[in-house]
Amino acid sequence: MIIMMNAPAADQVRRVQEKIAQFGLESHLLSSPDRIIITAAGDLEAVNPEQFERLPGVERVIPVATPFKLASRQFRGDATEVAVGAARFGGPAVPVIAGPCAVESYDQVRETALAVKAAGAAMLRGGAYKPRTSPYSFQGLEEEGLKILAAVGRETGLPVVSEVTDPRAVELAAAHLDMLQVGARNMQNYVLLKEVARANKPILLKRSPAATVEEWLMAAEYILAGGNPNVVLCERGIRTFETGTRYTLDINAIPLVKLLSHLPVMADPSHGTGKWKLVGPVAKAALAAGADGLMLEVHPCPEEAMSDGSQSLTVNNFRQLMKDLAVLSAALGRGESPATAGGK
Amino acid sequence: MIIMMNAPAADQVRRVQEKIAQFGLESHLLSSPDRIIITAAGDLEAVNPEQFERLPGVERVIPVATPFKLASRQFRGDATEVAVGAARFGGPAVPVIAGPCAVESYDQVRETALAVKAAGAAMLRGGAYKPRTSPYSFQGLEEEGLKILAAVGRETGLPVVSEVTDPRAVELAAAHLDMLQVGARNMQNYVLLKEVARANKPILLKRSPAATVEEWLMAAEYILAGGNPNVVLCERGIRTFETGTRYTLDINAIPLVKLLSHLPVMADPSHGTGKWKLVGPVAKAALAAGADGLMLEVHPCPEEAMSDGSQSLTVNNFRQLMKDLAVLSAALGRGESPATAGGK
Amino acid sequence: MIIMMNAPAADQVRRVQEKIAQFGLESHLLSSPDRIIITAAGDLEAVNPEQFERLPGVERVIPVATPFKLASRQFRGDATEVAVGAARFGGPAVPVIAGPCAVESYDQVRETALAVKAAGAAMLRGGAYKPRTSPYSFQGLEEEGLKILAAVGRETGLPVVSEVTDPRAVELAAAHLDMLQVGARNMQNYVLLKEVARANKPILLKRSPAATVEEWLMAAEYILAGGNPNVVLCERGIRTFETGTRYTLDINAIPLVKLLSHLPVMADPSHGTGKWKLVGPVAKAALAAGADGLMLEVHPCPEEAMSDGSQSLTVNNFRQLMKDLAVLSAALGRGESPATAGGK
Amino acid sequence: MIIMMNAPAADQVRRVQEKIAQFGLESHLLSSPDRIIITAAGDLEAVNPEQFERLPGVERVIPVATPFKLASRQFRGDATEVAVGAARFGGPAVPVIAGPCAVESYDQVRETALAVKAAGAAMLRGGAYKPRTSPYSFQGLEEEGLKILAAVGRETGLPVVSEVTDPRAVELAAAHLDMLQVGARNMQNYVLLKEVARANKPILLKRSPAATVEEWLMAAEYILAGGNPNVVLCERGIRTFETGTRYTLDINAIPLVKLLSHLPVMADPSHGTGKWKLVGPVAKAALAAGADGLMLEVHPCPEEAMSDGSQSLTVNNFRQLMKDLAVLSAALGRGESPATAGGK
């Protein structure tokens, strides 16, 4: 830990050094023309930098150890592999999760599931609880939606994932789903994170559009610290000034997460771009950047996804994209191609 | 509603016009060199622009009516006044809510409460449930913290406000508090918004550091639509590229909210700057921009707030700031000065 | 300077220490569980952190000294006062610079100048060289515009300021103007900064919408280092995700600049909001935050500024705002009110 | 063009309709509960939306035609191919431009040039005029640097590109270089854009870290409208809140530019990430997203690029990356691999 002091009084310096000693840390002082710097070394686990930040004369405290432990490469050097049914995230293969944005009906989900499975999808997605910006928008079929997903999952053999938004619904959702998704808006909903940590199912943790990679890994730390080691991270675009796309998919974040953490990281180009015409190129980009999986919105009704405004692919778009991804995956040496990853 | 189509086929145009007719809207078509535009007028309440965005050939749909209704100026022209005990938000006076970041002990809260009340604070704040980025940081005294706040509130006559993070704890919190705060990280936690809408207490809705003003008003709409008309908005800084301050307090948002909505809007310069030395100037700025209230972090232990790294004011800083705000408030014609607003 | 190394090899550590010694600095080493930290103290003026950042094993280098010297509070403790004719920036008074966005004609400028002077403006502004996003938009009257400004300045006794965009036009502009403006888009146009540093006129340096406060002060450092001590900084809004306003005026930046630098800092609420209805409240906010001046767009043709889309005030809006600012200025103890600042 | 009016007066509506008629456009009026909308169709080329935005009662004007013409897909449907010596941008191949950040000496540039050419680079880059945040940092060898580049270019047969920052130096630079680069900080330096438009050399136009894709294309429009059709766009990262990387490379921008424009677009993962360990994965991502070229910083002195803090690749890193890119390029059907694109 490094403590910077701006032209401090002698007693202010003494207080900082005393506090360092209280924690059983070794301190060292050095002065530059306009500042005094005190370094503290030793076991920093128990030390909260804020306790030093608040001391008089202190300008800035730089914690040296990474704030996340269980999620860090230091804690675990080799990549974690998370299995959801036959799908494996973090291994050589790159499973693709596909399905409609929202669960509308059994037929719609079944039709989509059969189509995406035939195209090589490894898992089925669909929203049962929809966090909507407007209270007047469709809020999802809720429990009925979970049942539809579970039924179609059994029927098609595809593991199913869906978002949970209410800590009171986690247990119910876990009974119907193979994987629980914590959505972007809830990435820092710590009450929900603690609840899913208790669920005996793998968690898909989407990045908040306003979270740094470090904050994202801290959210994962909540789940890991809560006793659930099966976390898959998903980059889905951050909020920037660019208005030509709905979000800016942070491609840098994929290799950065791999540098900092042992957890698998996937990408969601549908939300990350907001425009179906950009989904294909960005999906390929994410795969090339090292993504351990892809999440794609596929809409059963072809025509409806033909507009620029929509982020959903048609079944035909998806089928073609899966072919391209398979070729790319092979070229990248990602073992079996997405088109068969986790197949039956 | 305006629908833009990029070089569409004749039948694509026909489908859009048919769909407009289905909603009983009047449509009009006009073509420009590189586009066709179809406008739809009439009762747009029931129309979801997405339904058109998904039609083939559609490039973009521009909803003309504002997405929020109950929170809009169109719905209610005159300003809403929200009363919390003797404090009134949205009226001439500008109440100041002050207190420690976290409730640590009865003595700490009591000492701070007496000090800020003497300096003119109208309400007491303190965190009982702390959303922390790290699972290893202090998470708050929870129910014990609520009891401390309630006791000190009774003793000092100051209404108390604290953040709720768990929908399951809303009822308990409402029993102890005079006002419930929805924190920035939970602004789009719709499950929580629906729960506080059912609580019979005024709500302090903080803006998410990643939310546009429109999304913020949509979050308020959830509470209003849920049957709770007593919502006070609080700007607390948005996330930008600037690293010299913790957040960027969006001063523009204060007059913008007043232009768009009838709800009271206050500011939190402590979180909005992250540096106590900037809190005073930015508090004055928010008042001058038209804020209906201020929320300030005040720490009982003077020395601890003397560091640049801290966003808390000492009691002395606070006392001086309240004097300055009183003068400013008078000059701005905001009726009684903050230093007495809601006081007795 | 602090050098962090991530599990480095012994010889990598040695190389860093040797390099520190080469600069005649004192180094100290300390190790934490997952890192080694080397601190370097002494005369850091001549040291470029990059030289260390590039050494093998080095993860991060934290320069301790501020990168700007002449612009820093350390270099000069008391506030710099910049005089432009009778207007003084950085003193007790708060001069207001007003005028049209672009110089269109002698009559338009003269009419505006007389109106804003009567209302209390201390300086006249108007664009002769207009940086336009589109090559097809009006690019300004250029030299003809400068002559109009100079003539109206002489006639009204108002010092004039206008933007320069071409290093080849600086000398010409300096011959006609009392103050040269470097616009937001050119804040990091170092060729232009070096040229205006040579001009014998005060410089108004606008902040780039994408620059941190530190980068802004580094741009000022170019002018100061070039021999021109008369720099006035102007915050005009940064680029954020918010689309409800054209830019987000960074109110935090005003007290932050005063903390870090001795240079005067003013605000431009017209560009900072992009909506004339927000200009008044935000102008008051900037004044309350400690701004040393205000720049306001005033359009001579009343009706044209009545639209929400416009950021220009009408002469009547401006007259009323100046009255409000005068009251506020007095309450803030900013000596003579804007309405008379710089008035002969 | 669409003009929205918020509860306007009858005469305000009339004025808008009259102005539309003046431009010989056909107008149509429709009213919704809270607004009146007037649409204008016809030849909008000559119409500046601002002229309507300023009319009383007007809330917002939505231009329907894209603001850029020559750079748009509407203007030219097929992709533009820009040739620089043997390198072709916008064709099947994906040329790689490599070289040191700054030109330090003849030997350094020569050594790097020979190494990157052997590895398959199609062009050589190096900075002669360095825009530096600090006036105290090395500003480049300027003319001497241009001569070194030209000499090494002749010697190795690699076309050379370097940044120009001063309109007065464009002619000189054009005499020495095969391609002129307009750097990110100067993307909206219109004086420079007009000057390079007159140069008889292809232009590499980097995106400003604060520019939207539309503003970037508008900057290209300046060069095209100035008579220079040979523009290659380069995405180099935008400024966001993320601090884990120096910039956020906007991967979405690559397919978005291809959707909107016929100009070639390349990517610079070195600046886009700021960390050499992320350069490889992000370079592959850009290629997979459809980039027409890559720009990579390669440092001749191996050890110096071994730090996380550096964005430069070593020659060995580069050699390996070129092999990977060649495989990927083939899988993507980008004709000849980067490793040979534009080769002798």
Image (spheres, coloured by chain):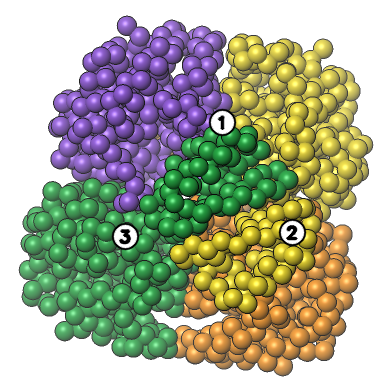
Chain colours: A orange, B yellow, C purple, D green
**Residue holding disc 2:** B25
Q: Nearer the viewer, mark 1 or mark 2?
A: 2
Q: Chain of mark 2?
A: B
Q: Chain of mark 1?
A: C
Tell me if residue C188 comes above or below residue B55 in the rendering: above
The CA span between labels 2 and 3 is 42 Å
Residue at (35, 9) in percent of width and height: C343
Task: Out of C250 and C45, give the one closest to the viewer.
Answer: C250
Give the SS element for disc 1.
Answer: helix
Give the SS element for disc 3.
Answer: helix
Kind of residue at badge 2 = Leu
**Residue holding disc 1:** C277
Q: Chain of mark 3?
A: D
- Residue B159 can be seen, yes or no: yes
Q: Are marks 1 and 3 on the same chain?
A: no
Give me the disc on residue D99.
none
Residue C203 location, x and y as percent? 27, 28
**Residue holding disc 3:** D220
Task: Out of C188 and A329, give the one closest to the viewer.
Answer: C188
Instruction: Give the quarter of the image for residue A275.
Output: bottom right
The CA span between labels 1 and 2 is 33 Å
Residue C207 location, x and y as percent? 38, 37
Task: Out of B258 and C305, give the one closest to the viewer.
Answer: C305
Kind of residue at badge 1 = Lys
Residue at (27, 34) in percent of width and height: C128
Residue at (13, 48) in percent of width and height: D168
Q: Nearer the viewer, mark 2 or mark 3?
A: 2
